[in-house]
Image (cartoon, rainbow, N blue to C red):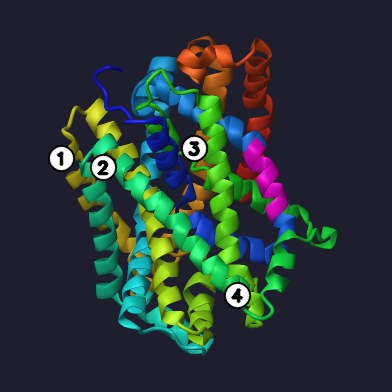
Amino acid sequence: MSNRSTWGSRLGFVLASAGAAVGLGAIWKFPYLVGSNGGSAFLFPFIVLTFTIGLVLLIAELTVGRAGAGCIVTAFRKLGGKGWGYAGYLGVITGFLILSFYSAIGGWTIAYFVNACLGSGLVSDQAQLGAHFAAISGDPVLAIGYQALFLIITAWVVAYGVSSGIERLSKVLMPLLFILMLIIIVRSLFLPGAFQGIEYLFSWNPEAFTFDALLSTMGFTFFSLCLGSGCMLTYGSYLDSKVDLIGSSAWIAFLTIVSSVLGALMVMPSVFAFGLDPSAGPGLTFVTMPAIFAQMPFGNLFAISFYACLLVAAITSSVSMLEIDVAFLHDEWKWSRPKAVVVTTVALMIVGSFSALSFGPLADHKWLGKTFFDWIDYLTSNISLPIGGLMIAVLSSWLAWPKVKPFIAGDQSHLHSESTYTVLRWSIAIFAPILVITVLLSGI
């Protein structure tokens, strides 16, 4: 452990991990999911699941990383044996594939931020806005160019290392993210009719609660905490023995919930204030929100702030995904960090271009009704992430518990009783797999 990079502080680790978890999910995905699944009927179960099963899985993944003192392949092999090392390659591949399509969305975010800064793209006609989005995502030069720019920014941060790059960025961008979100929320709440959006989010509506909504909630809980790919495992491998993972994981889960709720509060009051559809789906961020900003006084300033939030969230998450593969190349293949960053980024640009082109020249090239972008999203979100989470749960609780347990609290073991560890172990061993298997089967 002494030869590995380490976080400079517990705060830096928590903010970086929260940034990894927040990502585009909080501002792009959560608002349209909560809008499409009955508001509070999605929000309340999400909070409960995050602070229960999600929390114990987060503790398990971080602990496996700290106990294994390496990337997901190294950690799995140390704790479970040679065969488990091969299983860890699933996480390396998953992280790469997620970033290959995530970077396409990150590219759109840069495009919308640039447009907002230039004062363009804000019109109230959603048909025009839909055409505007299609023009950005469907133009090969713009789509690949902005995607490449997003990957270069991500690579630049990761190249500086854990403490000087990822941690330093997170200490600046995470507070900035919350400040920008609060500014937009305050403005939105003063719009006539905005309170209907608050009621939609927080007034319990049992009629809106369905099994499908619950499945969506479970899937997003998994997605929002960045579980299963080895991202949190990699971050855990850079921890020293002074950090109590139970308390730190609780803070990460709390910040994830707060950011998701704030993301919904940025969007829903405005949507209701202007009489738009809260269940507009994925287009809520890139089509509906510009229509709202076009009708606001000083709307362009708020559009700049909104897309700055989106870009900040995207970068804090993308650096964590790139770090999965950089850590693998550094730990297993003994590559230098700069070489690992450059090679991985170039490979991402090549593979990711197929996702970026899925909304333009490759839009009609489908297999079983899905584009390349759709397939990568489906395979990672619905299959490889849940399988990765299941493997971490089984490895940490059933196969390697004696090796893992001392690393949960590190030097702070006196803070927790033996009964705490017992409850934690069996939650990871039994209840967490139930959630993961449910997500996996529903996704398939």
- Name the residue rendered at 60%, 64% in the picture: 265
Residue 45 shown in magenta: yes
Q: Which mark is residue 270?
A: 4
Q: Secondary structure at mark 4?
A: helix
217 with respect to 88 (left or right): right
Badges 2 and 1: C-beta atoms under 8 Å apart?
Answer: no
Q: Give the vertical position of 352 relative to 282 (above or below).
A: above
Q: Quadrant of the N terminus?
A: top left
**Number of numbered labels in the structure image:** 4
Q: Residues within 10 Å of mark 1 (few under 14, many from 20)?
A: some
Q: Nearer the viewer, residue 343 or 297?
A: 297
Amino acid on which the number 4 mark rests in the picture:
Ser
- Name the residue rendered at 51%, 18% in the picture: 409
Camera-near label (2 vs 1) is 2
How far across and how far down the image is residue 150, in percent? 29, 59
Amino acid on which the number 3 mark rests in the picture:
Gly
Q: Earlier in the sequence, mark 3 or mark 1?
A: 3
Measure how far apart labels 2 and 4 are at the Cα level.
36 Å
Q: Magenta span: helix, strand or loop, mainly?
A: helix
How far across and how far down the image is residue 254, in percent? 58, 42
Q: Residues within 10 Å of mark 2 (few under 14, many from 20)?
A: some
Measure how far apart labels 3 and 1 are at the Cα level.
26 Å
Q: Nearer the viewer, residue 364 or 264?
A: 264
Camera-near label (4 vs 3) is 4
Numbered range of the magenta stretch: 43-51
Q: Secondary structure at mark 2?
A: helix
Amino acid on which the number 1 mark rests in the picture:
Lys
406 with respect to 210 (left or right): left
Residue 440 shown in magenta: no
